[in-house]
Image (cartoon, grey):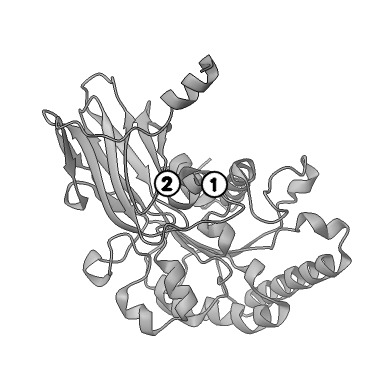
């Protein structure tokens, strides 16, 4: 066997059978990326409360079981970190890596910044893997980003049996709430940490709540009412990919009114649809996208004319003006596309003075 083949084998996921590792459940770490009380959910890693099963469409409910944007944070002085996790569906897609669909990313705080450590690679419904070893036994802060397109039914963190684990202290800053489409949900990041909401969470050290529903981010009243209950830093609405111009005209103003009934001045940001990469040749797609964006801009102008304050508008990122290499299929983003999109949003947040430079 070649040296290269040996190297590949050595990097394969390792199943832990060492009795020297103790595993700890959600009672020992802080779950972030959700503001819904655990007692109101079927699983701690769901994104909608159980009562919403009767309020939303079945498809949307099923998508809410995916743990997109949810993370856990803890401290430990272990020399190794292992993981056991079980997923709901063992979901597969032909244009997204399984590490992004149902894997788990490990980060650690280093020099006050989140630094990538390793990815837990899935092998089925039930998974177990050692993520890092041979560390010095000092307390570090860790963050695990959970699967983007599958649900988590069980999660346990493994540490040395002579080490300690401590639940992290909650971030006191108000969260940023995102409501959107498959891109918001994380399609098609190669691993969970590369979804733009998770990138922004790390870069700004702020909790981000992800209400991205693949193919189903349509500014629907039940979801708008739910997000209006959150005391957010600000709201980012990026639903246009799942809407047509008629729906935009019908739903943008009610969305603002519902949120304003609960929060009189919390900023709301609307984001234009990205121009699909085929649109420079397919004129039907180009025309449709232009009409959707014009409808959103018209509604934005009407909102301002009606006297609403702290409403903002972000234009299409126009990634084709860079190198046109940020998508996996002309629509959904690669890690490169997500990084660029996250940076573009942060740039606009700073321009609007919603975060400090």
Mark 2 vs mark 1, CA separation in Å: 9 Å
Q: In this view, does 91 lie to the left or right of 53?
A: right
Q: Which residue is drawn at 69% across and 72% down?
A: 296
Residue 206 showing in the rendered view: yes
Q: Residue furthest top?
A: 3
Mark drawn on residue 103: 2
Rendering quarter of residue 51: bottom left
216 up-or-down from 171: above or below: below
Q: Which residue lies furthest to the left in this view?
A: 162
Residue 171 showing in the rendered view: no
Q: Please tell me which residue lies in front, 241 or 23.
A: 23
Tell me which numbered mark, 2 or 1, is placed earlier along the sequence. Answer: 1
Image location of residue 253, percent across then percent down: 59, 80
Image location of residue 311, percent across then percent down: 58, 67
Disc 2: CA contacts within 10 A as few (<14), some (14-19) or many (>=20): many
Mark drawn on residue 38: none
Disc 1: CA contacts within 10 A as few (<14), some (14-19) or many (>=20): some
Element class at badge 2: loop
Q: Are marks 2 and 1 in contact (CB under 8 Å)?
A: yes
Rendering quarter of residue 141: top left
Element class at badge 1: loop
Query: Which residue is tagged 1?
Result: 97
Q: Please tell me which residue lies in front, 42 or 208.
A: 42
Image location of residue 351, percent across then percent down: 61, 49
Q: In this view, does 22 lie to the left or right of 298?
A: left
Q: Please tell me which residue lies in front, 308 or 48.
A: 48
Q: Please tell me which residue lies in front, 62 or 122.
A: 122
Image location of residue 35, percent across then percent down: 32, 63
Q: Which residue is drawn at 44% across and 41% down?
A: 202
347 up-or-down from 312: above or below: above
**How many marks can you see?**
2
């Amino acid at each position: 066997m070649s040296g290269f083949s040996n190297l590949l084998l050595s990097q394969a996921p390792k199943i832990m059978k060492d009795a020297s590792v103790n595993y700890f459940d959600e009672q020992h770490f802080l779950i972030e990326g959700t503001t819904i009380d655990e007692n109101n959910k079927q699983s701690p890693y769901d994104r909608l409360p159980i009562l919403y099963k009767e309020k939303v469409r079945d498809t949307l409910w099923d998508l809410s079981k995916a743990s997109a944007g949810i993370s856990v944070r803890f401290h430990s002085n272990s020399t190794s970190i292992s993981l056991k996790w079980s997923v709901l569906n063992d979901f597969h897609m032909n244009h997204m890596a399984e590490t992004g669909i149902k894997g788990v990313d490990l980060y650690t705080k280093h020099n006050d910044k989140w630094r990538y450590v390793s990815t837990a690679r899935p092998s089925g419904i039930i998974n177990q893997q050692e993520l890092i070893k041979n560390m010095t036994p000092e307390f570090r802060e860790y963050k695990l980003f959970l699967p983007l397109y599958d649900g988590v039914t069980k999660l346990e963190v493994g540490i040395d049996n002579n080490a300690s684990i401590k639940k992290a202290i909650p971030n006191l800053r108000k969260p940023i709430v995102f409501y959107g489409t498959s891109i918001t949900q994380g399609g098609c990041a190669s691993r969970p940490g590369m979804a733009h909401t998770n990138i922004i969470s790390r870069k700004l050290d702020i909790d981000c709540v992800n209400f991205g529903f693949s193919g189903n981010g349509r500014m629907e009243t039940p979801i708008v009412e739910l997000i209006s209950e959150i005391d957010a830093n600000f709201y980012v609405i990026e639903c246009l990919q799942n809407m047509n111009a008629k729906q935009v005209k019908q739903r943008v103003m009610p969305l603002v009114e519902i949120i304003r009934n609960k929060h009189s001045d919390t900023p709301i940001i609307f984001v234009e649809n990205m121009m699909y990469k085929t649109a420079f040749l397919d004129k039907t797609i180009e025309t449709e996208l232009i009409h959707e964006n014009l409808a959103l801009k018209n509604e934005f102008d009407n909102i301002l004319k009606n006297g609403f304050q702290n409403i903002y508008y972000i234009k299409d990122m126009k990634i084709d003006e860079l190198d046109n290499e940020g998508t996996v299929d002309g629509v959904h983003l690669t890690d490169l596309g997500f990084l660029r999109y996250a940076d573009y949003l942060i740039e606009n947040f700073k321009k609007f003075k919603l975060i400090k430079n």
